[in-house]
Image: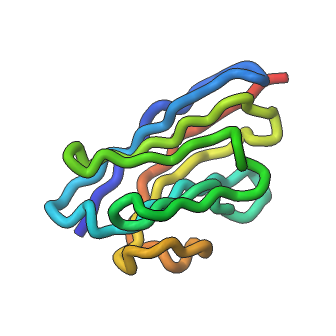
Amino acid sequence: QVQLVESGGGLVQAGGSLRLSCAGSGRTFSSYAMGWFRQAPGKERELVAAMSWFGRNTYYADSEEGRCTISRDNAKNTVYLQMNNLKPEETAVYYCAASSLGIIKLTPTSYDYWGQGTQVTVSS
């Protein structure tokens, strides 16, 4: 069982930066692949970035390439998403998720545990 708690969301102007954090519980946290998803009103949940179980591999959505970085500190059971040069269309609730498969998966159904989400609002 893994519990996830996101933090770090908020209101930021276009072009600004935010760092989201996801604190996890459980001794086997490092064995999970981690993903950051977002969901805007009326839209499907989409993957922003993901990292494999020990940080060996990463994935970024095409729209995020070069503007965000996913990282993890397994000693602290925490995953981070650094987002730079934010755009208004990236306003959404951001969720972190853990997959027991350990490898990067792109679909929400591949993830077993979810946080409650943190709101990110980017003003123009």
In the displayed structure image, the side of residue 99 where residue 121 appears, left or right: right
Q: Quadrant of the N terminus?
A: bottom left
- Residue 116 horizontal/vertical position (percent): 45, 51
In the foreground, 63 or 93: 63
In the foreground, 59 or 89: 59
- Residue 79 horizontal/vertical position (percent): 39, 47
Q: Residue at x 51, y 47 (%)?
A: 70
- Residue 4 horizontal/vertical position (percent): 34, 53
Q: Residue at x 77, y 57 (%)?
A: 62
Q: Residue at x 56, y 43 (%)?
A: 69
In the displayed structure image, the side of residue 79 where residue 15 appears, left or right: right
Residue 48's place in the image compared with 121, above or below, is below
Q: Quadrant of the C terminus?
A: top right
Residue 120's place in the image compared with 44, above or below, is above
Q: Residue at x 59, y 56 (%)?
A: 49
- Residue 96 horizontal/vertical position (percent): 47, 54
